[in-house]
Image (tube, rainbow, N blue to C red):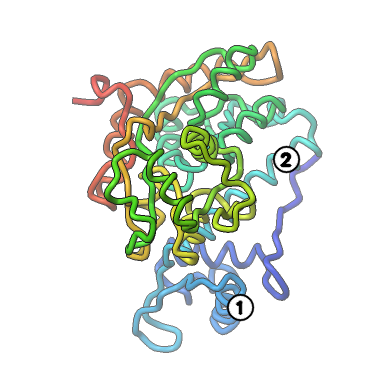
Amino acid sequence: MENNWEVTVSLGDDLPGGVMLLLLAGIKETGSLSRAAREAGVSYRYAWSLLNKLEKTLNQQLLVRRAGGYAGGGSELTGPGLRVLSYLLELRQETRLQLAALLQGPLREKRGRQLVVASSMEPVVTGLLDVLEQAYLQETGTVVRHVAAGSGQALELAKAGRADLCLTHAPELEEKFVAAGWGTRRLPVMVNDYVLAGPADDPAGVCVTTAVVTALQKIAVRAAFFVSRSDLSGTNLLELKLWRKAGIAPAGEPWYRESRSVLGSYGVLRQATELQAYTLVDRASFIAGHGGTALKICLEGDGLLVNVFSVLPVSALKTGVDQEGAEQFADWLTGRTAQSIIAEFGCYNFACSLFKPVNPSRQTA
């Protein structure tokens, strides 16, 4: 069957997802709404009307215009605008993969020399995985695509035969995955750490503590708002483990908000900002995804907050995957080129690396 179908998404009444995706991508690429509108095949007036409607629907400012006249000047996406674009791209890619599997039979048989990585959200939304995939393509000629999900969901996608390997940060789930024969091995790739973020005025008084368990106990005693991802991601699993260590069962408490409808740590940060709440996120997500001063890092440095990202090739004995290709990509991720990319990623935009390589000795000298 020919690939003569296209995936479209409706974002609400009179908001065609395909056009919105073209406009947002065009603005990011060209810095001009008028040029993005031309390339999308719509008028400037219509494009501006669509963006206004989308901003009202999401209650977020997605675009900043620079002076230059009605159809001139320049435009750029805000932080929320970039996140909407990222989510739309990921949704389109994931839907295309699923439709390919449905319409063309087993995915791997039709895609040629390609690999699919089921990845946790953090390497995707920060842009790191895109950079790594492009570098691998240039070096080896192998195309690597990714599907973004929470770590628990990513491992389930692999079990369903929809990914050749996983890049996740849920150690306990990963060890079970390998022990059950689904993964051939577990290779640590990079690390960062989790931080407890909260309102600038710190209503629970956690900034004076150094132990995350003590901080959670203070939040519970003060009944201060806390936003949880509640999606079985690596972040969510660690958060639940920390509540257990604190001797607290927060589910159902009016101050504990479970945000199943948001996408990743960026969405949780947005909700925490709106509620003036605390939340647990990894440092890369906080740096790249929090664009204001409403929240600050209230606690960091606890040994319980170490965050390790590992790659797990999927076993061909369990499901129809390209195990050989997955093993090669896994080795590359822990090798010199990838480790150097990881060490430098984020330094230009944020003046610090968002992740640390696990093999610094393998960085390019």
| 1 and 2 marks in contact (CB < 8 Å) | no
Q: Which mark is residue 53?
A: 1
Which sits in the foreground, 149 or 302? 302
Please indicate whether residue 251 sits to the left or right of residue 127 in the image.
Answer: right
* Extreme residue in the left direction: 365
* Residue 32: quarter of image: bottom left
The residue shown at (65%, 21%) is: 321
In the displayed structure, 5 sits above or below 49; it is above
**Quarter of the figure with the N terminus:** top right
Which residue type carries mark 2?
Answer: Gln
| Residue 215 locus on image (x, y percent) | 38, 45
Please indicate whether residue 238 sits to the left or right of residue 360 in the image.
Answer: right
* Badge 2 density bin: few <14, some 14–19, many ≥20, Cα 10 Å: some
Tag nearer the camera, 1 or 2: 1
* Residue 175: quarter of image: top right
* Residue 203: quarter of image: bottom left
Which residue type carries mark 1?
Answer: Lys
Residue 341 in sight here:
no
Q: Which mark is residue 332?
A: none
In the displayed structure, 180 sits above or below 245; it is above
| Residue 61 locus on image (x, y percent) | 48, 73
In the displayed structure, 205 sits above or below 81; it is above
Residue at mark 2 = 98
Q: Secondary structure at mark 2?
A: helix
Residue 286 in sight here:
yes
How much space separates mark 1 and mark 2, taking CA atoms?
30 Å
Q: Secondary structure at mark 1?
A: helix
